[in-house]
Image: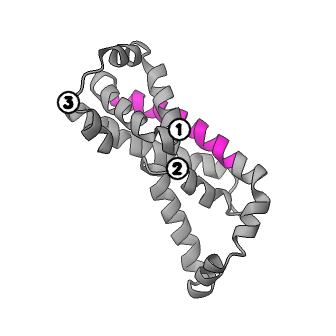
Amino acid sequence: MAAYILFANRSYPALNEALLGQGYLGSFLAGLLYAYAFTAAPATFILLMLGREQSLLWAGLVAGTGALCSDLIIFHFIRQGFSDETQRLSQEKVIQTVNRRVPDSIRKYLYVALASVLIASPLPTELGVTLMASSTNISGKRFAIIAYLLHTSGIFVILYLGSLV
């Protein structure tokens, strides 16, 4: 909604024409941008615009694929490049306090729920992906399915809101 408030009363004809002229490639690019914290707001604005012009179903599926591509990059980067840092983070006092006070069965679902909210919304997806990537029991394939469903559902909501405006 912040993107809509920022861009609602402004006209950007060059941007509109460039994005709409790309068809579903514009949806894919918006999905790629949607997954990163610094580009989530402009991507949300783009998706709001595309919601008025494109099929909600196809635009959502294509943008969800773009977001998934970005998520997989983050997932593999965290899994491969930051495994030592993730291990050290688990030794921090705050994390150990949470681990002691929250039972394992609840903590596992709490992390997944928090990660799911972060991935589905235009909030910093990197944090949600990091939470999931740090879990040793989630495979890349399972993560891809979960991330695609979450991002696509969030993107469908944004596209729908864009179709109403």
Please provide percent x and percent y for residue 84.
79, 61
User: Which residues, given as a range, are shown in magenta?
Assistant: 56-76
* Pick the front one: 2 or 60: 2
Frontmost of labels 3 and 2 is 3
Q: CA distance from mark 3 to mark 2?
A: 28 Å
Q: Give the residue type that dot 3 points to.
A: Asn
Secondary structure type for disc 1:
helix
Give the residue pinned by disc 1. Answer: 67
Q: Is residue 129 left or right of residue 55?
A: right
Mark 3: few/some/many CA within 10 Å (<14, 14-19, 20+): few
Mark 1: few/some/many CA within 10 Å (<14, 14-19, 20+): many
The rendered magenta stretch, by its main secondary structure, is classed as helix
Q: Earlier in the sequence, mark 2 or mark 1?
A: 1
Q: Quadrant of residue 68?
A: top right
Please provide percent x and percent y for residue 21.
39, 12
Q: Which mark is residue 26?
A: none
Give the residue pinned by disc 3. Answer: 9
Give the residue pinned by disc 2. Answer: 125
Please provide percent x and percent y for residue 77.
71, 46
Q: Residue furthest bottom?
A: 101
* Pick the front one: 40 or 9: 9
Q: Earlier in the sequence, mark 3 or mark 2?
A: 3
Q: CA distance from mark 1 to mark 3?
A: 27 Å
